[in-house]
Image (cartoon, rainbow, N blue to C red):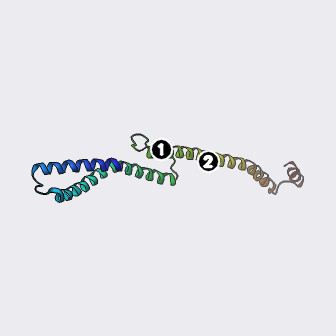
Amino acid sequence: MVFIIMTLTIMLTAGATMVLIRCGVIDGDPRGLALIVFACVSVIIGTILSRFVGKRPIEIIVDINEATKRVAKGDFTAELSEENIPAIELREMAHNFNVMTQELASTEILRSDFIENASHEFKTPISAIEGYATLLQRRDLSEEKRWSMRTAS
């Protein structure tokens, strides 16, 4: 990418310098002045090209950063668009991010199901024990009934 920007910058600057020489803006011994003009135009064109060419990758990195913040807060529905990403590495990063969020969402579902089932399995015997304990606390219950309930459980 840098090579392309530099090549375009040099070609555009050389063209601009040639036009200035032919138009008579640069006359006499143009080597010193041409070099200064060439350097200034190169810096300007290189800056402009870098700004436009580098804008898209930066936007993609900002999107990945924002999506990562959402995942850190527990939102596993965050998804990145994998289309129209020019750099292969950034496209792969977006794809891997999407796979990661899908796996995290699946893990979260398994975790919540496990907690729900384990909680239910603990509540059932505790409810039975609580029922027997309540019955055993009744004052009108005879000692024989109380004893038979203890041995039955």
Image spot of residue 54 (x, y percent) = 34, 50
Label at residue 92: 1
Q: Quadrant of residue 27?
A: bottom left
Q: Position of residue 122 (x, y in %)?
A: 72, 50
Residue type, label 1? Glu
Q: Is residue 84 left or right of residue 141?
A: left
**Label total for image:** 2
Gap between marks 2 and 1, in whole Å?
A: 30 Å
Q: Residue at x 25, y 47 (%)?
A: 11
Taking depth in this image into account, of 54 and 110 the one nearest to the observer is 54
Determine whether 135 is above or below 99 in the image.
below
Q: Of the numbered discs in the image, which one, if any, rests on residue 112?
A: 2
| Element carrying mark 1 | helix
**Alpha-carbon neighbours of circle 2 within 10 Å: few (<14), some, or many (≥20)?**
few
Observer-nearest residue: 145 or 97?
97
- Is residue 98 visible in the rendered image? The answer is yes
> In terms of depth relative to the viewer, which is nearer, 33 or 135?
33
Task: Confirm whether residue 55 shows in the render.
Answer: no
Q: Residue furthest front?
A: 29
Which residue is at a point 73% across and 50% down the rendered structure image?
Answer: 127
Q: Dot 1, crowdedness within 10 Å: few (<14), some or many (≥20)?
A: few
Q: Amino acid at mark 2?
A: Ser
The answer to which of marks 2 and 1 sits earlier in the sequence is 1
Residue drawn at 85 percent across, 50 percent down: 149
Image x and y of residue 90, in percent: 44, 46
In this view, the mark in front (2 or 1): 1
- Residue at x-position 79% and y-position 52%: 132
Query: Do the residues under discs 2 and 1 have CB atoms within 8 angstroms?
Result: no
Q: Is residue 38 left or right of residue 64?
A: left
Pick whichever, 8 or 124, lies toward us: 8
Residue 140 image point, x, y percent: 82, 55
